[in-house]
Amino acid sequence: MSAGPDRPGGAAAAVKPSNWRTLAAPQLLPLWLLAFALVFARLGTQLVVAPLLGGAHGLSVAQIGFAFALSGFATLVVFYPAGRLMDRYGCKAVITAGGLGVSAALVVLAFAGGYAGFLVGSLVLGASSGLAGPAPLAYVAGVLGGEQRTRGVGIYRALGDAGAVLAPPLLGGLITLRGYDTALLMAAAPLLLATTAFAWRSPAAGPTA
């Protein structure tokens, strides 16, 4: 029986390793967009928007710290189940769920009217980050082979780092000009679009292909 596209050994049929043009294949472009948008939304919220938003809601330092601890704990708890889910359903499904979850968390935070909403948004953000954290690199390793694999991992990390660098000044500027809700929604929108495009256009891949 031949290997399916979401199984080890079947990924090479989805994207054949050849040269740098392989990495510009249309079915991989959503992945590169997702690399930037995911880190931009996740780290921009955790490092910039969420602390300032908590202060704007009148929360104490202890309350904000507890929300951050809850978010980090949720990320840690989800890591192992995320690996099991990748084995069972494939990296693509886990990445899609993580991207949608982070987008939803930002919307919750945007409309949070108090501490309860802030906690819920932080919890969803942490759990979704646990899903979306390790899966993309496993996906790159599964969908690309040979020399393209190392190049793909490098491109994914570089785009993610670009998102981490640009998120603080851009989201900080949006907060100043338009407020917290606009900043969060503007971070969620490109991530939602990138996740949808990834789910629709990108090939499936096993985590060890």
Image (tube, rainbow, N blue to C red):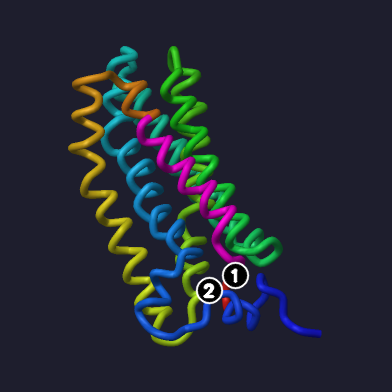
Where is residue 154, by image quadrant?
Answer: bottom left
Q: Which residues are magenta?
A: 186-204
Which quadrant is home to the N terminus? bottom right
Q: Which quadrant of the figure contains the C terminus?
A: bottom right
Q: Residues within 10 Å of mark 1 (few under 14, many from 20)?
A: many
Find numbered disc 1 in the image and state the secondary structure of the residue it sits on: loop
Residue at (40, 41) in percent of width and height: 190
Q: Residue 98 appears at what percent x and percent y?
A: 53, 48
Residues under numbered marks 2 and 1 in contact, where contact means CB atoms less than 8 Å apart: yes
Labels 2 and 1: the sequence-earlier one: 2
- Amino acid found under the numbered disc labelled 2: Val
| Residue at far right of view | 1
> Distance between the Cα atoms at labels 2 and 1?
5 Å
Residue type at tag 1: Ala
What is the x, y in percent for residue 23? Answer: 40, 72
| 194, above or below 49, in the image | below
Q: Main secondary structure of the magenta part?
A: helix
Residue matched to label 2: 143
Kindly state the secondary structure of the residue where label 2 is placed: helix
**Is 65 situated above or below 138?**
above
User: What residue is at 37 percent from the left and 29 percent from the top?
Assistant: 184
- Residue 205 numbered mark, or none: 1
Q: Residue sitting at 52 percent across and 50 percent down?
A: 197
Q: Is residue 186 left or right of residue 203?
A: left
